[in-house]
Structure formats: C-alpha cells, structure tokens
C-alpha cells in the first residue's frame, strides 16, 4: 500500500506522458527516460503542460556533481520550493557512444525544460 501510494506520487512528477520507469534512490526522486523521450523540441511543451497541471519541479542531471542545467550556476534558484527531479542514468562516466549521447540529450532536454519553467515562474 505504501509503495503503491509512493509510486503514484512520483509518477505525478513525471515531465513526460509515459516515463519508462520511475525509481527512488536513497530518498531522492529520479526519473528514468529513454533517449527517444529526451527530445529537446518537446521540452518546452512538457514544461508548460506540467506547470499548468501544478507540477513545477526542475530537472536535474548527475555529472561530477548533481546539477540543474539552465539554473543559475547550474543549481536551482535560491528559495526554489518546487523541488528537483533528477534524470536517472546520467553520470560523468559514459559507457560507450550511447552513454555519451544519452547524457548530452538529458542535459540539453533538462536545460530547455528548466528554462521554460523558470520563465513561467517569473
């Protein structure tokens, strides 16, 4: 029951209509997305739709440190109270060309998504 409630809460945070899997690691929310779902052209529309539905989180990626692409100094703005959901599978260690493409696409998608969210927050 608790796991079901927790997963339904996490799924409500999704920036895409059909995330492949949502996982929880050590209390942090992470969203697993396929390389195809990280289409930067869709990011602004995904952000606007989520904003209208009350989901106002930013997206983060993991590198050497956890970052929020498009945020001031690659972080959430001071006082940001809507949270950050990290894209799972991002890292500063790339496994082959797919890993490199995935990490770049995740960073680019998150930057466009976050720019839209931050613009809407003004």
Image (tube, rainbow, N blue to C red):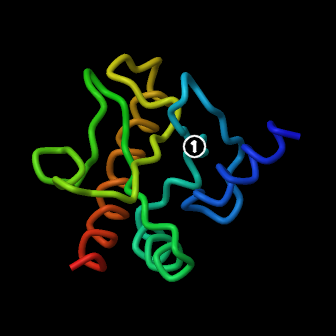
Query: Which residue is painted at 37% across and 56% down in the image?
Result: 58
In this rendering, would 109 be left or right of 118? right
Query: Which residue is painted at 62% across and 32% down in the image?
Result: 24
Above/below status of 38 relative to 41:
above
Q: Which residue is mark 1?
A: 31
Above/below status of 72 relative to 88:
below
Query: Which residue is painted at 45% across and 41% down in the image?
Result: 86
Q: Quadrant of the N terminus?
A: top right
Residue 94, position as x, y percentages in the image: 40, 20
Residue 98, position as x, y percentages in the image: 50, 30
Q: Exactly how many numbered labels are in the figure? A: 1
The image quarter containing residue 67 is top left
Return the residue nearer the eye: 15 or 96.
15
Q: Which secondary structure, mark 1?
A: strand
In this rendering, would 5 be left or right of 9? right
Q: Quadrant of the C terminus?
A: bottom left
Residue 64, position as x, y percentages in the image: 26, 21
Residue 100, position as x, y percentages in the image: 39, 30
Please rate how many residues cluster around mark 1, counting C-alpha atoms within 10 Å: few if below 14, some from 14 to 19, many from 20: many
Return the residue nearer the eye: 26 or 2.
2
Above/below status of 105 relative to 39:
above
The image quarter containing residue 115 is bottom left
In this rendering, would 33 be left or right of 60? right
Return the residue nearer the eye: 8 or 108.
8
> In the image as oriented, which residue stretches furthest toward the right?
1
Query: Which residue is painted at 57% across and 43% down in the image?
Result: 31
């Amino acid at each position: 029951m608790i796991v079901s409630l927790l997963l339904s809460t996490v799924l409500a945070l999704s920036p895409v209509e059909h995330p492949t899997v949502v996982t929880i690691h050590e209390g942090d929310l992470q969203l697993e997305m396929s390389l195809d779902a990280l289409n930067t052209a869709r990011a602004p529309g995904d952000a606007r739709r989520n904003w209208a539905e009350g989901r106002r989180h930013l997206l983060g990626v993991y590198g050497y440190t956890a970052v929020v692409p498009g945020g001031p100094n690659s972080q959430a703005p001071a006082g940001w109270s809507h949270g950050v959901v990290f894209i799972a599978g991002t890292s500063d260690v790339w496994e082959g060309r797919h890993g490199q493409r995935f990490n770049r696409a995740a960073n680019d998608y998150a930057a466009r998504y976050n720019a839209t969210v931050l613009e809407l927050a003004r």
